[in-house]
Image (spheres, rainbow, N blue to C red):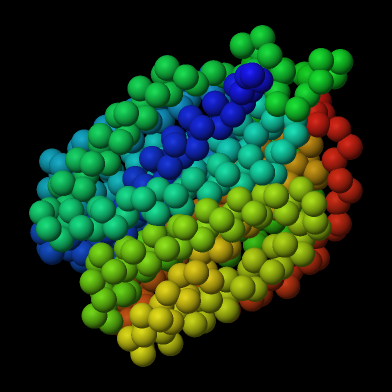
Amino acid sequence: MKRIHYSWVILFVVFFSILVAGIVRSASGVFIVPFEIDFGWERSTISFAFALSLFLYGISGPFMAALIEVIGLKKMMISAMTMLLVGVSLTLVMSKPWQLIFIWGIMIGLGSSLFLTVLSSHVVNQWFGKRRGLALGILTASTATGQLILLPLLAMLVESYSWKWAIGLVFILAFTMLFVIGLFMKNSPKEMGILPYGIEQNMDVNENKQTKNPITIAFHALLEAVKVKEFWLLAGSFFICGLSSSGLIGTHFISYCLGFGFTAVAAASMLSLMGIFDLVGTTLSGWLSDRFDNRWLLFWYYGLRGLALLLLPFALSKGSIVLLVLFSIFYGLDWIATVPPTVNISRQIFGMEKSVVVYGWIFAAHQLGSAVAASGAGWMYQTFNSYSWAFTLAGVFCLLASLFVLVIKKQEREESAYQTLKF
């Protein structure tokens, strides 16, 4: 019987690590109303804390990529999961708005950064020589899988008992994942004396340990990237991606549905439905990104997402569960499907080694967009007593993004699995 290559074990561990980190982040949407009721805090204040988290975990991405090269993957994953555990624990004893901002804005933002930014691309680059697109699609989809499994359960715990029960469940999951990382995670194939999946024995695989300061590595990569037009196009489109996904849907969708008479469980179930179809769509996107022009994939993803977001205010105003289900399916199929083609284009332009740090900066733009949406939608609700303008504007921006991704210069397919590029 042929042994399973350990790269797939690593994929399994990273998949569930991202899943747990993703559910910690996305759980914020379940806690907005309970925090508002229990503590008497304004929704704009709560939204600011979650927006700060989105921004920090995004802007930290390139530095996390550089730290992996200096400290090592396993130590970084253990440190990040420990920070999430501490943040979740402190939530149970917070009582002031500044504590919410510190715990959810800073600690959970930084703790989730490694898992939700550059971890997938780093692991795929290091552990896979073949089927990179498929592996990246699977890892990218893991964020939505967490919502698929757990958001309705968290919402039911909040409605039936208390938000503290939901926090307790998240703590148990994070603690379990910390143990799994410590037991099974490895830094690289070389550590185990094996080659990445799909690489033949006669191929030369280079692994150069970085010794420079991580801040120097991150900013050096940025200084080189900003000279390239495609960096700005990828960063701009990813800004809109963040603005129209985690920052808006992930933070305010449940609250938006509550305003039209839907229950928190029903709204969380719609997010789970999005998760089901995102798991399919993002995995398929990874497969497609190995075979088709990634620019046209992004064109269709942003265009379809924009149309879905324009449908949502109409669906809620009609109180139609059928239209809401259609939105969840339509939107879910390409929620995070933009990641595999964006990572592929970045790797083709900037090379294997540089692309992880450069993608960290591109993802920082994504999270800047997320923060703008999370905070801006809260402000719009406070001003207009409605989220409709926020969701409509996000849809229009997606249609705009679908046009300018086509300006990206077409890239040639990668000729070899590994390249050696130094900063």
Residue 399 appears in view: yes
| Residue sitting at x 32%, y 34% | 174
Left of 249 or right of it: where is 416? Answer: right
| Residue sitting at x 77%, y 64% | 296
Q: Nearer the viewer, residue 108 or 127?
A: 127
Q: Nearer the viewer, residue 303 or 329?
A: 329
Left of 379 or right of it: where is 38? Answer: left
Left of 149 or right of it: where is 351? Answer: right
The image quarter in which residue 139 lies: top right
Residue 390 appears in view: no
- Where is the N terminus found, in terms of image quarters? top right
- 284 up-or-down from 138: above or below: below
| Residue sitting at x 58%, y 44% | 138
Q: Which of 389 and 254 is in front in this view?
A: 254
- 7 up-or-down from 400: above or below: above
Total labels drawn: 0
The image quarter in which residue 187 lies: top right
| Residue sitting at x 47%, y 58% | 276
Q: Residue 176: x and y, percent?
A: 32, 29
- 184 up-or-down from 90: above or below: above
Q: Residue 144: x and y, percent?
A: 46, 52
Q: Which of 417 and 218 is in front in this view?
A: 417
Q: Residue 3: x and y, percent?
A: 63, 19
